[in-house]
Amino acid sequence: MLYYRDSDFPPRYEAIREAERNLPQHNLDLPFPEGKDGRYVKFKCQIQQLGWNNVLNELLMNNYLAYKSKRAYVFSDFVWKREYYPWSRFKAYEWPPRTPLSALISGPTVGGPWEPNDHAPRSISEEWYEVVCPPEKRRIISTRDVKPLVNNLPGNELFAVWQKLLLEAPEKCIEIQPVDRSEDNFPQVFDLWLWGTTRVLSLWDEFSKSPVSRLLGTSSVVERNLKANELLFHARHEEVEIVDPYSRMLAIHLRRGDFKEACVALSDWNSTFYSWNLHEFLPDKFTPPSGGSLGKNTPENEALYMKHCLPSDEAILQKIRTSRTDYLNAVEKSGGKKGEIDVLYILTNDESDWLEEVRQIMKADGWRVVATSRDLKLDMEGKDVGMAIDMEIARKAAVFIGNGWSSFTSNILHRRLVDGTVPMSNRFY
């Protein structure tokens, strides 16, 4: 009888966890505003056990609030929603499973330095918070104390209320705790009712120019796995050191699996696009149609939602064609070199034969290279952060087509806009 060793187990991240423990700001002897006399804020209300991108947009804004309040942000592991974890419970080392935040991103949010001459306190780990802010030093602020006062305010005004509170509080250690979900189903400082409406847009100008956004970086895990897969985006091996595939790439986010039910729910609640996808300067917009009742839309309206949320193969092909043409024309009109867009990358969670059918449709339409999320060869750490790898590919692509209701799309858009991509390169179907 033959036996084999199953090597497909989650990573333990020993080196990354050790690096987080050894951040230089984890030192009680550092001068103010760090060390034992520093100022800190922990968002105990921060969302957990949901998709990575629901978590990411919130923790970045929490970090920005901490920065503007002259306090160090306390970062913690990403805690997985159980259904999304790429390994079974049998293989997990802990449940719910966790991934260190610096395996997913880099920059000030995970303890990286601010810019030279910026003396803001650096972010600290949740583990170090227990040392520098023991329970007897903490002031607890309940979201109940503030949220009823700000629930309907524009995002910048909501932000200002929290900033004033955190700036003026004399206590060195602040912990913001959520109320029970029976009282507030979204008990975050920056909650779904903000992210899912145009109220969030008033935060964009300052947030996008802030060091939290500008210094947000790609993790070493993501970079390593992308480097290992660079041949995937080239038609010929000899192009690898010569041609930048991202300058010729169109990336499209095609979520499938459970997304039909999600699209129906979006229709039922007549939802707008999500977060930064709502920007007026972007070429593709969606206005929720009138009609229907709260919790159930009309058949005509539901069909309109499905057209944009879960498009047909023909609609996908047409959107890819027009987006490529529009972008190349915009580049030429601005005086740039028109170039070529002939590499197609499909970001998807689909595991059915449908994906291969779409690939063949695109190849038949003349795309030189067609690659998908399923084609990536990842190590175990890469498998764990696969969503961040897809996001980095989309960030670097010349053109990106996303889903306007998706936080995944919105966070890709955030980085693309901070990078300076032109609006015409950012599309929704």
Image (tube, helix red, strand yellow):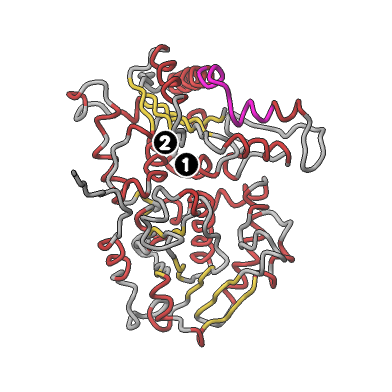
Q: Is residue 82 left or right of residue 3?
A: right
Q: Measuring 62% from the left and 69% from the top, which residue is drawn there?
A: 178
* Residue 402: image tag: none
Question: Which of the 4 quarters of the picture holds residue 355?
Answer: top left
Mark 1 residue crowding within 10 angstroms, few (<14) / some (14–19) / many (20+): many
Toward the front, the furthest residue is: 1
Q: Main secondary structure of the magenta part?
A: helix
Residue depicted at x 63% and y 25%: 307
Residue 387 falls within the magenta-colored stretch: no
- Residue count near mark 2 (Cα–Cα under 10 Å), binned few <14, some 14–19, many ≥20: many
Q: For residue 394, which numbered disc appears in the image?
A: 2
Spatial distance from mark 1 to mark 2, Cα to Cα? Answer: 7 Å
Q: Is residue 58 above or below residue 262?
A: below
**Residue in view at x 34 percent, y 28 percent:** 247
**Relative to 378, does residue 44 appear above or below in the rendering?**
below
Label 1 sits on residue: 412
Say left or right for 187 vs 346.
right
Q: Indicate the position of residue 393 as horizontal and vertical percent values.
A: 37, 37
Front-most of residues 49 and 140: 49
Ranked by sequence position, the earlier of labels 1 and 2 is 2
Q: Measured along the vertical axis of the image, is residue 264 above or below residue 184? A: above
Q: Which residues are magenta?
A: 304-317
User: What amino acid does circle 2 point to?
Assistant: Ala
Contact between marks 1 and 2 (CB within 8 A): the answer is yes
Relative to residue 93, is residue 241 drawn left or right? left
At which x and y percent is residue 412? 47, 41
SS label for mark 1? helix
Image location of residue 121, percent across then percent down = 41, 70
Label 2, secondary structure: give it: helix
Residue 351 percent across, percent down from the top left: 44, 33
